[in-house]
Image (cartoon, rainbow, N blue to C red):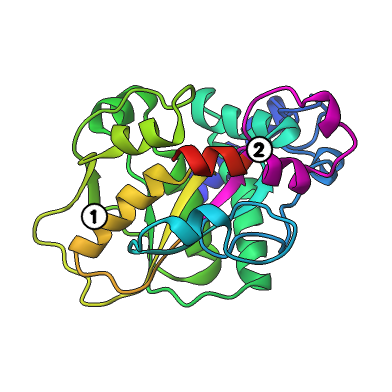
Amino acid sequence: MAVRRLLRGAAEILYPPRCVSCRRLGSHLCHACRRDVQWIGDAICVRCGGPTLERCICRFCQQAPPDPLRGVRGVTFYGGVMAFAIHALKYRGKRQLARPLAGYLIAHLDAHPLRFDALAPVPLHPQRLALRGYNQAALLAQEITRARGVPTREDLIARTRPTPPQIHLSRRERRQNMLAAFAPVQGRTLNGDAVLLIDDVCTTGATLQACAEALCDAGAGDIWALTVARAWPKREPEAWERGLSPAEVFVHWDAPQMERA
C-alpha cells in the first residue's frame, strides 16, 4: 500500500490531474465545478425518489404494487458536470472519480441516516466487467466502506444475463429488460440483514428493483437504494413549460407516463 501511494504521488507530480468537466489542473473534479452540481433536495417521492413539488408518495407509486425496495434516493440531478464525471468514471477509466462521487453519497447519508448492515453494488455481467475492468458501482461502495466501516458485499447477487442498453427504452420496456437479469449467489444468505444498494445513476429504478428482488430472495431485510445521480427524461420543454421549475416540469411530464404505465 505504501509503495502504491508513493507511485500514485509520483504520477500526479508528473501528470497532474485535470478536472473532467472544465479541464482545470489540480483535481479530477474541481471545487468550482462541484458548485455547479444540482442537488435533488428533500422534495421527493419517498418511495421512488423522483423529484416532486413536496415530499410525498407520487401518483405512480400510489398505483404500483408493493416491492422489496423500501425506497430509492438519488443525490444529484444527472446532467452537466455530473454527467461528465459519471461518464468518465464508467467509460474512460477514470477510477479516481469514485472518491469525489462517493463523497456525495456519504454526504447524503450524513444528512439522512439509514441503518444498513451491508452495501451491495449493482453487479455488471461478467462479459461487461471483463471489458471494462472494474465495476463503477463497486468502487463507489468501497469508498463508503472506507468512510463508514460497513462491508461492501459483491458476493450477494449476480447478473445472470447481459441486457441491452436501456437509454432509449420506456419505463415498461426497462422493466421487461430487467426480468430475471439478477439472482442471489448460491450459498449466500442474509438472515434479515438490511442492505443498501449502490449505483451511479437511476433512471426509472427498474435495475434497482430487480436487484432488490434478488436480495429479497437471499433473505435480506430492509432494502434501500442510493445513487449518485437521478436522470431526467430527455426531451425539449414545451413552450408552456418554459419558466417552470424542474419539479413542476417533472410533475406535468410524469402524469401521462404514469397513466400509460
In reply to whether residue 228 is colored magenta, the answer given is yes
Left or right of 146 in this view: 20: right
- Relative placement, left or right, of 229 versus 150 is right
Name the amino acid, label 2.
Trp
* Residue 178 position within the rendered picture, expressed as x and y whole percent measured from the top left: 30, 38
Where does the image place residue 112, in percent across and percent down from the top left? Answer: 63, 72
Residue underneath mark 1:
214
**Quadrant housing residue 26:** top right
Q: Which residues are magenta?
A: 226-253
The disc at residue 253 is: 2
Report the amino acid beneath label 1. Answer: Ala
Residue placed most toward the observer, 1 or 48: 48
Crowd rating for badge 2 (residues with CA inside 10 Å; few <14, some 14–19, many 20+): some
Name the residue: 74% across, 51% down: 39
Mark 1: which secondary structure?
A: helix
Which residue occupies the foreground of this view, 118 or 151? 118
Q: Residue 135 at what x, y percent from top left?
A: 40, 38
Residue found at the far left of this picture = 187
